Image (cartoon, helix red, strand yellow):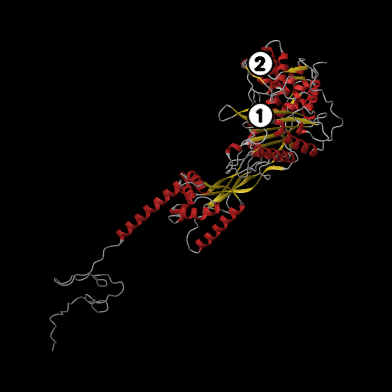
Amino acid sequence: MTAPQDPCRRRVPGPAGPRGDRRPRQGAARRPGDRAGKFSGRPAQRPRPGGPRPLRLGSPRPRLRLISLGLTLVMLVFVVRLLQVQAVDASAYAAKANVNRYIPVTLSAERGSITDRDGVDLATTVDAYDITAAPDLLTPETARTRDAPRQAAALLAPILGKDQADLEKKLTDNPESKYVVLARQQSPQVWNQIKDLKSALDDSAAKGRGTNVLAGVNREAHSKRVYPNGDLAAGLLGFVDADGRGAAGLEQQLNKKLAGKDGKRVYAQSGGHQVPTGDVKEQPAVPGSDIELTIDRDIQWAAQSAIADQVRKSGADRGYVIVQDTRTGEILAMANAPGFDPNDITTTNSEHLGNAAVSDAYEPGSVSKLMSMAAVLEEGAARWDTHVVVPNRLSRADRAFADDIDHPTWYLTLNGVLAKSSNIGTILATEQLGRTKREKNRILYSYLRKFGIGRPTGLGFPGETPGILARPQDWSASQQYTIPFGQGLSLNAVQAASVYSTIANGGERIAPTLVRGTRGPEGDFTAAPAPKKTRVVGKETAKTLAEMLESVVDDEQGTGAKAKIPGYRVAGKTGTSNRVDPKTGRYRGYTASFAGFAPADKPRLTVYCAVQNPTKGSYFGGQVCGPVYKKVMEFGLKTLQVPPSGKQAKRLPVSYNPGQ
């Protein structure tokens, strides 16, 4: 019997396969290689209406074509960009890469030294560093921290001794900058501290602990100016500014020779560090020349010590001493008091920073009488023994002139007029220079000019004053009588010393000099040009004047007894003048001075001293500056091993007996 069929499962007859079996029904497992919806080798039978529909998959070829097209377009973009970078814009990108990679560094030239005449350093240089930074390495994107400038400033402030806010401002003012100076002229010890701190931060960053915020901090080698002798000759030497340029004195005047020429170094860097194997291009710096001065350090010390002590004792505003070699015009000492330490000028009163010995213009007083006497003798208007009757008062122009003390009528020789420093006697003597006032004034003016008054000394020193000497036609009624005894004209201390050196040198003026020569980087020495020489008076006149000056010091009636030096003949002259107050422009106080040379019979040294506005004790030149002159002259003669005088002075008469 035939079994009844399941109404839910009807067998669908179909053709048999190659082996007589039938195709699997829908839902049955397919053999590998069978296609969906088909039997092997035969078309699939349509599903019965109402039954499940077979799954049909789309062809993958369109999708593969789309993907291939996309990849082709992407590759085409890369190829075009590559051609642009490597061919079209190659040079521009290379330039940008070099800008970002290579760091230019200035190689500062070593500043030349300033030495005294024996090669002893007065100003020299030591190693120092400018601490720099690259702000572009401290941006949040590069440093990977938001407050890298603040962190860097906090770390550097105590080491550099700078304000943290100021450092942070420098690091953030221009974030794209690759170079900013944080501190100048720091010692090697300071850089070593920063370098150690950078290494520690590098180690921490390598271990994943934080960022090295000092990666862009570097240093530039520079030289720091130092003055081994402190305040010795400070007014003469001057000082340099923060950039290492001369800002005063010889440092400023000779800056071009001293500074040399900076070089340049360009190196590859990455992350603030130099690439060891990177390219380095270097143009070496050319060192500056050494300057050898005419100054003798020991004599400079003696002069500076003496004037500083006297200014302090006298309660004076200031003072200066000049020491000059009478034979060569070389200045052996130029001392100022008060002085300053050029190693640290931050705490110094600005009024003391200059060189008052050449910048102060003041009325010289009686030391100027030497020039008047030189004119009288050279013109033949009188002789050293000419009799001069000197009353207690002399009426001229709109006033009555007097000497420094009241006295009965003096009967003096011309030598005595100089020895006793008589203003009245000097007026009477110079009145013999011409038949008219105009002629007399013109002749006196010509001698004052030849002595160097009213014109530059020849030193070329910064801030130097030529003094004040009006033309003779412009002299006032009183000025034509005051100028002969040193009021109504002005000069500086170097000019005053040069007047006496001229007489000591036989009447020939040699322009004063401060520089003996320069020594170049290769060690070659170049002597300074020979100074200009000018004949002012004849040798006989100069010899007579030297003998007259001895009476000032040696004669008991002379005003310069405190300048005597045992064993040496001394020629000198005191000066006490009314002082013009620079603040009010009116006369207030006095200028005390003393000038002279020794040995008088064979001159070697000139010493000039001036003290401005002494307020304690005496204000007379012989009392205030005479002792300073003696100390400095005595020290200088011994230092230079000048032998004592060989014979006694003539002792020219100071006065005469009117009855004879």
Instruction: Report whether 318 appears left or right of 37.
Output: right
Q: Nearer the viewer, mark 1 or mark 2?
A: 2
Above or below, 479 against 262 in this view is: above
Residue 45 locus on image (x, y percent): 19, 71
Q: Secondary structure at mark 1?
A: loop
Q: Closer to the camera, 651 or 90?
A: 651
Q: Closer to the camera, 283 or 458?
A: 458
Query: What amino acid is labelled 2 in the image?
Result: Ser
Q: Closer to the camera, 132 or 153?
A: 153
Residue 599 locus on image (x, y percent): 81, 31
Residue 568 locus on image (x, y percent): 82, 33
Instruction: Report whether 22 appears left or right of 2.
Output: right
The residue that mark 2 highlights is: 395
Above or below, 65 against 282 in this view is: below
Q: Quadrant of the N terminus?
A: bottom left
The residue that mark 1 highlights is: 492
Query: What amino acid is labelled 1 in the image?
Result: Asn
Residue 89 in sight here: yes
Residue at the bottom extreme?
1
Question: Residue at point 38% right, 53% down?
Answer: 74
Rendered image quadrant of residue 506: top right
Instruction: Report whether 634 appears left or right of 141.
Output: right
Above or below, 616 against 98 in this view is: above
Above or below, 14 against 512 in this view is: below
How many residues crowd mark 1 within 10 Å: few (<14), some (14–19), many (20+)?
Answer: many
Q: Closer to the camera, 253 or 403?
A: 403
